Amino acid sequence: MNIGDWLFKNLTRLFAVLVLAIVALMAWEMIRGSGASIGEFGWGFLTSSEWDPVQDLYGALPFIYGTVVSSLIALAIALPLSLGSAIFLSEIAPRWIEGPVAFMVELLAAIPSIVYGLWGMFVLVPWLRASVEPVISKNLGFIPLFRGAPYGFGMLAAGIILAIMILPIITSISRDVLRAIPGTQREAALALGATKWESTRIILASGKSGFLGATLLGLGRAVGETMAVTMVIGNRPEISLSLFDPGYSMASVIANEFAEATTEMYTSALIEIALVLFVVTLVLNAFARFIVWSVTKTSGGSR
Amino acid sequence: MTDAGRGHRWRKFKNAAMLSLAGLAVLAAVVPLFMIFFYTLSRGIGSVNLDFFTQMPKPVGESGGGMANALAGSGILVGLGCLFGLPVGVMAGIYLAEFGQNRFGMVVRFMTDVMSGIPSIVVGVVAYILVVLPMGHFSALAGGVALALLMIPTVTRTTEEMLKLVPDSYREAALALGVQQWKASVRVILPAAMKGITTGLLLAIARAAGETAPLLFTALGNRFWSTDIGQPIASLTVIIFDYAKAPFEDWNRQAWAAAFVLIGLIFVVNLLFRYFTRDKYGRA
């Protein structure tokens, strides 16, 4: 190999190594930065709901609760819609519909989080407060989930916004999964006299693990989503069963309090929350990518 | 009616019902898009005027003014992000496309995919530790680093994908002429993929321009005109956040205007991307 080729290969390789190094550096810096908080609170950090900057006591439970609940609401709404959309796009729609509609779903992913937040604050929240939550609590108020004053700002609003935001990724990965299933399976089912839906069900069964991957990717997005959630969740560090009540999420507390964290322990506690988010999303994404890769057998895009 | 006939009818009914449900799901998925477009358009467009682009924010209580500093700030932040992020992403992408058919390439590919799923707020925290802490204060530089870290995975994978779209025959033709491998890559393959890469980069840049969370405690924000990368700097997205929370109607109005500008930018870039990659990539 001549010198030019050697240089070219190793120079580009250097940058590829750099990408790996960056991920490692991120982990390392956050572990170091949260050292004080980890040393002080240990595992109790994750189970305590005391968040008191004045006394320098920190427990992340209310934020973990808020993140988990809002993400679960989002999944509950987004999953059926995304699967339905993916089925429609890849199995039913003619090409001239498929293209533009798929583009619109992708555009949904391109809208910045802050714009979702703005829309959520000024359109979704007032609507929930005035029209949706009173009606639900009147009719289903006997269920603790739907009890309480209709604030508008709260878990439900956060869940709905998140659902809209994770819909595109679940849809597009599910589409890739469906597309990777050989056409012969559909033809075989149809040839046996199955209806379109019956053949689709067979296809769905063989795409199961792929859909799981898509769902986990969506979950990873929901867990880390910041601005839109911060603007509609109400930002109150309380654990309340009602979905109408304000809550707080891990990402939101970092967004709201990091710049104003006064003590070293305060900053360290917030960094520890970031570290937890980092680890959770890393594991979710690694697991999900692994599944999706093995199902679609192509390297896919970095969606 | 026979049992078979009833069963058949039931199956046909179920078929129609489920297929329409799928159609409804798409409808429900696309409705929010139109609602968001509609609201940003109707509430934002009235406030997008010359002042918006050329004036500075007015003090609290006075209405009017614009976002000149935030526009410049966003430009500087995204510029810094490109400066740090693009070389890394593009070079790593070239490596993956040219030499990445091995285990190491798979690992890098996997990690970039995983990295693209790391929440932007976490990236902001890292940029804070890496830049703000050593400098002792918030700065545009820190914001730029955060944006760069966010751009790297997208840029890497886009570059790789666009390079792979170039037919092998190009390379073979160059090599057959006795050109060295690296020259074939740099002078033949790269230029052939340039259009796709550029639009892909534009997409990554537009996405970076829409980021808010990683800027909150890196670039922070600034009510005044500043182009000093060592100092806190305003940005379009952070100002939307501040103005949306503020109890002043005039600020809320301007937040919508800024959102409109942002959405417009992103929409145009996405259309461009689709247009330039339509025959090779868009339908894939």
Image (cartoon, rainbow, N blue to C red):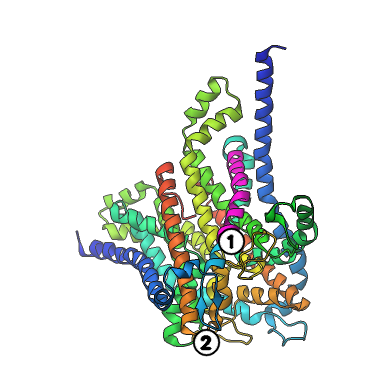
A151 displayed left or right of A286:
right
Helix, strand or loop under label 2: loop
Q: Quadrant of the N terminus of chain A?
A: bottom left
**Looking at the image, which residue is at 65% across and 34% down?**
B19
Circle number at residue A285: none
Tell me the subunit letter for badge 1: B
Which amino acid type is shown beneath numbered disc 2? Gln
| Bounds of the magenta segment | A66-89
Q: Nearer the viewer, residue B258 or A188?
A: A188
First in sequence: mark 2 or mark 1? Answer: 2
Q: Nearer the viewer, residue A223 or A301?
A: A223
Residue bearing the label numbered 1: B269
Asked whether, in this view, residue A175 is left or right of residue A247, the answer is: left
Instruction: Tell whether label 1 touches label 2 (CB within 8 Å).
Output: no
Can the viewer see residue B148 in this picture?
no
The residue sitting at 54% across, 20% down in the picture is: A191
Asked if residue B113 lies left or right of residue B27, the reply is left
On the image, the x and y values in percent for residue B24 come to 69, 42
Q: Please state the horizontal and vertical placement of residue B17, each as a whole percent of the image.
A: 68, 32
As measured in the structure, the alpha-carbon distance from the residue carrying label 2 to the one carrying label 1 is: 30 Å
Instruction: Tell me, yes or no, whether the highlighted magenta stretch contains residue B162.
Output: no
Q: Main secondary structure of the magenta part?
A: helix
Which chain does the residue under circle 2 lie in?
B
* Residue A266 image position (x, y, % from top left): 50, 80
Q: Is there one chain holding both mark 2 and mark 1?
A: yes
Task: Please say if B214 is above or below A206.
Answer: below
B141 versus A128 height, above or below: below
Identify which amino acid the numbered label 1 is placed on: Val
Q: Quadrant of residue A109?
A: bottom right
